[in-house]
Image (tube, grey):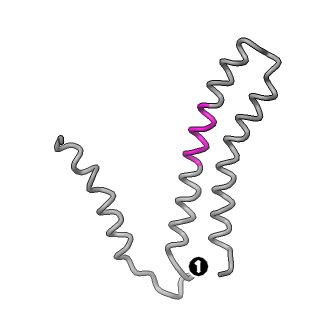
């Protein structure tokens, strides 16, 4: 294994140790600081997934549209389905931040 990959392999371990060792006061605005991290991860990872999905669907859709112009509506639906992933991420983040539990 190359020495350049060693810091990349140790980075998640160091970050997780830092996150788990941090103590949040019990009187924070949300009651638990981990909810804020979870909401951020929900939006960020959903946006990355939506970007990948839309990129693949749009690339394939352009290939289809060069041969069959009548498939525009179907291609548009497939691209919109990929965007729905980001909407779900935002929805989960809002539920985490403002939900009563």
Q: Which residue is drawn at 65% across and 48% down?
A: 85
Which is more toward the observer, 81 or 14?
A: 81
Q: Position of residue 6 (x, y in %)?
A: 21, 49
Q: Where is residue 70 in the image (x, y as percent from the top left)?
A: 83, 18
Residue 86 placement, left or right of 7 = right
Relative vertical location of residue 21 with respect to residue 94 in this rendering, above or below: below
Q: How many labels does the image show?
A: 1
Q: Residue at x 45, y 81 (%)?
A: 24
Q: How crowded is mark 1: few (under 14 residues within 10 Å), some or many (20 or more)?
A: some
The C terminus, quarter of image: bottom right
Residue 99 placement, left or right of 20 = right
Q: Where is residue 31 in the image (x, y as percent from the top left)?
A: 56, 82
In the rendered image, residue 7 lying in the magenta stretch gets the answer no
Q: Residue at x 52, y 59 (%)?
A: 41
Q: Residue at x 79, y 22 (%)?
A: 71
Which is more toward the observer, 85 or 24?
A: 85
Q: Where is residue 42 in the image (x, y as percent from the top left)?
A: 57, 59
Say which quarter of the image contains residue 15.
Answer: bottom left
Magenta stretch bounds: 47-56
Say which quarter of the image contains residue 35.
Answer: bottom right
Q: Mark 1 points at which residue?
A: 30
Residue furthest toward the top?
Answer: 67
The N terminus, quarter of image: top left
């Amino acid at each position: 294994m190359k020495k350049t990959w060693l810091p990349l392999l140790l980075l998640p371990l160091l970050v997780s140790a830092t996150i788990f060792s941090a103590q949040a006061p019990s009187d924070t605005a949300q009651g638990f600081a981990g909810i804020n991290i979870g909401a951020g991860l929900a939006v960020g990872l959903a946006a990355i997934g939506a970007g990948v999905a839309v990129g693949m669907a749009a690339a394939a859709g352009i290939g289809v549209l060069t041969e069959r112009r009548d498939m525009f509506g179907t291609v548009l639906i497939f691209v919109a389905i990929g965007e729905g992933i980001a909407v779900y991420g935002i929805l989960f983040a809002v539920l985490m931040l403002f939900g009563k539990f």
